[in-house]
Image (cartoon, coloured by chain):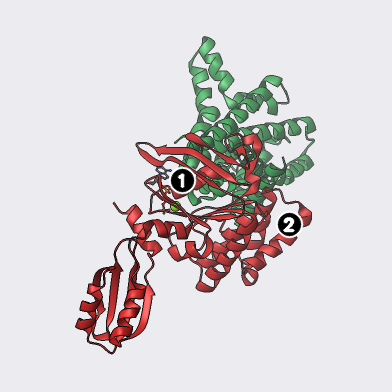
Chain colours: A red, B green
Amino acid sequence: MDIQIEKLTKTYGPQTAVNDISFDVKTGEVLGFLGPNGAGKSTTMKMITGYIGIEKGDIHIGGKSVTNPSNDLKKHIGYLPENNPLYLDMPVMDYLEFCGSLQGIDTLNIDKRIREMIGVCGLNREKHKKIGELSKGYRQRVGLAQAMIHDPEILVLDEPTTGLDPNQIIEIRKLIRDLGKEKTVILSTHILPEVEATCDRILIINKGKIVANGTPETLRKQAQGNEVLKLRIEDGDADLILKSLKELNTVQSVEYVQQNQNLFEVQSLAEQTSKRHIFNLCVQKKWVLTELTPMETKLEDIFRNLTVN
Amino acid sequence: MQTIWIIAKRELATFFDSLIAYIILGLFLGFSGFFTWLYGNDIFLVGQANLRVFFSIASWSLFFFIPAITMKMLAEERKTGTLELLLTKSVTDRQLILGKFLGSVLLVCIALLATLPYVITISNIGNLDNGGTICGYLGLLLMSITYTAIGVFASSITTNQIVAFMTALFIGLFFHIIFGVLAQNFTGPLGQIFDTLNLQSHFESISRGVIDSKDLVYFLSITVLGLYLGEWSLSKRHFS
Ligand SMILES: Nc1ncnc2c1ncn2[C@@H]1O[C@H](COP(=O)(O)OP(=O)(O)OP(=O)(O)O)[C@@H](O)[C@H]1O
Ligand SMILES: [Mg+2]
């Protein structure tokens, strides 16, 4: 099932939380939803899952509008709300059974599904405890388990890995990637490496508007200006090397990273590359080139450029 | 229907898990027992094997205890955010309201069943009017569902349990006393309207053994209205 969002708008009093945004998520795709605090991520997710009404625009899931309750789309959605609300006085197993049966899993399959979820989310040692007795990370796992228990075709996860330990983060990311092969997943997060590790596509919103939409590579390409190289050149005088580098005709600027270690950062002119020239220069002067690393624009930088104003 | 039952069942299970149920049942039985047997209208002095006193006391106890049962129903869900969890599952606002309502009505029924020993003891003292007893219980039941619906509504408008409790009690007060008092102070059509709104007069006519469809309509319409307002109050989140 794919999701189409058309011109979605939501205002809270004078404030426009989501402002005329449109995007699609296809089956078999994991969409990373980024944006600074208050950008409107959770609000958008609440509209997709049908918790709050749509003010303007529309959302279609599998071609059907969420505004028509008779489509009963909620059965196909698994949702982990922000802050992961849970019934703290319920034991884990009872809670999962409650959630599963509300989503219409029949009594024959429910035990099997509960066991699977407990395995997948690593809850085996805690399954008989009350949720209120669990640590934060385990509660988060229970939240994930309830979202996935009915094997939904669409998963909407609002900050799914907060509070998890590094091992579990890796497991959950892998799980999301695997699920994402057949299902449609939207996840929001503030952990940028997580997006690169799990998502096929990134959507960045700021103040309710989309400011970027694309794969991590395309975003990088768009954001990338000139080529930047990090160099270490040994067996030569640092100042002399700096001067010679500056004289290369593809180079725009050269700076020291660390003078005493002969580390330089070289920025090329637009649309130009200096790698070959640098190599040839070193051969010619009998310097030893021990390091040449192209510097990629980090996702953090892209994010900051688009959302700080 | 399945969904409503799942929600009601969880509600009952939580009650009995958290001791609240036992406390409320204990207080209810203690309270109504104390006043029925010992205080003032002593059943032995009256020397009559009828349960009039008991039904009147029980109706007052329920008046206080039902808001205590219903106060957390939706207020708590709103406060902890589990409302969002429920309503994004395959559950409609109406099913949630009805599930909560059913859960609390069942608890009240358990409380009413627990008073049966009183009835049995009294029937040993003298010959008991079976029809009257059944009608008395029917009156209590109808009154209970009415106050439960009001309580569910009161719980749906706030995140604070105490506010929900006070609101339910405040609305209940009108039906339980204020309309009755007004009915006595006004004559003519206005007095009649207040008398129609007065829950006590409907309750008394049923527990006297007269089952009139007017009384049934009265209780059921307030119930439906309360539940409907509860649903409306949940749906307001769509339009903020
Ligand atoms: N119920 C509400 N009433 C009033 N304003 C609200 C409500 N819910 C959200 N907002 C406002 O809408 C804006 C978007 O909020 P939202 O929760 O969608 O942000 P977010 O992108 O999820 O942020 P975060 O990264 O902090 O979770 C915020 O400015 C918030 O104050
Ligand atoms: Mg959020």
Task: Return the x and y of residue A23 as percentages of the image width and height.
Answer: 50, 44
Residue at 60% of width from left, 34% of height from top?
A68
* Front residue (pair A234, B220): A234
Q: Which residue is mark 2?
A: A110
- For disc 1, the chain is A
Q: Is mark 1 within 8 Å of ligand 1?
A: yes
Q: Position of residue A142 (x, y in %)?
A: 59, 61
Name the residue located 59 percent from the left edge and 42 percent from the top edge.
B39
Q: Is residue A36 above or below residue B182?
A: below
What's the residue type where badge 1 is placed? Answer: Thr
The secondary element bearing badge 2 is classed as helix
Q: Does dot 1 land on a helix, a strand or a loop?
A: helix
Q: Residue at x 39, y 67 (%)?
A: A296
Which image quadrant for residue B216?
A: top right
* Quadrant in which residue B95 is drawn: top right
Instruction: Determine whether A110 is above or below B89 in the image.
Output: below
| Mark toward the start of the polypeptide (1 vs 2) | 1
Q: Nearer the viewer, residue A235 or B41?
A: A235
Q: Nearer the viewer, mark 1 or mark 2?
A: 1
Disc 1: CA contacts within 10 A as few (<14), some (14-19) or many (>=20): some
Residue A54 tag number: none
Q: Residue furthest bottom?
A: A235
- The residues bearing labels 1 and 2 have C-alpha atoms spaced at a distance of 31 Å
Disc 2 residue type (three-letter): Ile
The residue pinned by badge 1 equals A43
Is residue A70 left or right of A46 when viewed as pictured?
A: right
Q: Nearer the viewer, residue A211 or B57?
A: A211
